[in-house]
Image (spheres, helix red, strand yellow):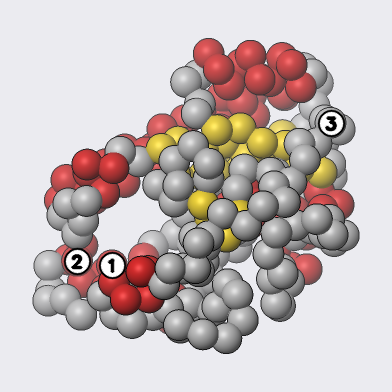
């Protein structure tokens, strides 16, 4: 089944693919490169969302660097929406593929919070795709709390598929890819990233959400 899924994802043009057993959320591997404190709360585990889940499949699509460098811009905003739509479409196809093989499978929306303004009042998604990608061996965390990948650095969008199929997992990345240069701290336009303390440090998600909302609506900036 894993080989079939790899072949299917290749046909869909998926750049990054990883497999993690659902139990990694409750028993994180000791070789993980970053110590996350606190760990992912139980209500955000795959088993809490889809109790039958045995495996989490994570897919990733890159965001082109020349467009990222224009942010904040309409160009970047449109690319962001395009990549999100593509992730939804491809994850839907993978879930259907698994259903046709006789396995339960559901895909999760790539943002998992509904609307940017919701994050201002409650800055949490109901499932973290970057943590799923981390546990599926696709990268390690940077100081800015973004997942760094060997292939594309931080310029990747992820989404996840939960399935009842027990698929051999991928090994986790054991190397910390962050160089701790703190350029993310210096360049954050709203000062949301602490320069010291635990690694990765807690980012002020509310400040990020406010700025994103204002950029989208055009009502000023922070």
Element assignment for label 1 = helix
Q: Which mark is residue 212?
A: 1
Question: Which residue is disc 2 drawn over?
Answer: 215
What is the total number of numbered labels drawn onto the structure image? Answer: 3
Residue 63 percent location from the top left of the image: 35, 41
Q: Nearer the viewer, residue 208 or 90?
A: 208
Q: Residue at x 53, y 60 (%)?
A: 178
- Toward the viewer: 16 or 220? 16
The residue carrying pointer 2 sits among few (fewer than 14), some (14 to 19) or many (20 or more) residues within 10 Å by Cα, namely some
C-alpha distance separating marks 2 and 1? 5 Å
The Cα–Cα distance between marks 1 and 3, rounded to whole angstroms, is 38 Å
Left or right relative to 181: residue 19: right
Question: Residue, x 33% and y 82% (percent of image)?
Answer: 191
**Residue 1 at x, y = what percent?**
79, 18
Residue underneath mark 3: 168
Please identify the quadrant where the C terminus is shown.
bottom left
- Confirm or deny contact between disc 2 and disc 1 (CB under 8 A): yes
């Amino acid at each position: 089944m894993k080989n079939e899924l790899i072949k299917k994802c290749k046909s869909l043009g998926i750049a990054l693919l990883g497999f993690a057993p659902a139990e990694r959320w409750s028993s994180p591997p000791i070789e993980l490169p970053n110590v996350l404190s606190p760990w992912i709360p139980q209500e955000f585990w795959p088993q809490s969302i889809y109790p039958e889940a045995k495996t989490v499949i994570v897919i990733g699509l890159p965001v082109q660097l020349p467009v990222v460098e224009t942010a904040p811009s309409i160009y970047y905003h449109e690319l962001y929406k395009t990549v999100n739509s593509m992730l939804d479409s491809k994850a839907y196809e993978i879930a259907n593929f698994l259903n046709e093989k006789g396995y339960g499978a559901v895909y999760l929306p790539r943002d998992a919070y509904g609307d940017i303004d919701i994050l201002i009042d409650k800055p949490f998604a109901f499932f973290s795709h970057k943590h799923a990608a981390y546990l599926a061996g696709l990268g390690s965390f940077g100081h800015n709390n973004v997942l760094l990948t060997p292939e594309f650095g931080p310029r990747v969008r992820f989404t996840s598929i939960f399935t009842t199929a027990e698929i051999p997992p991928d090994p986790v990345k054991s190397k910390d890819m962050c160089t701790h240069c703190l350029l993310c701290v210096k360049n954050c336009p709203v000062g949301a990233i602490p320069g010291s303390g635990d690694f990765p440090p807690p980012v002020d998600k509310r400040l990020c959400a406010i700025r994103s909302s204002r950029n989208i609506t055009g009502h000023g900036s922070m």
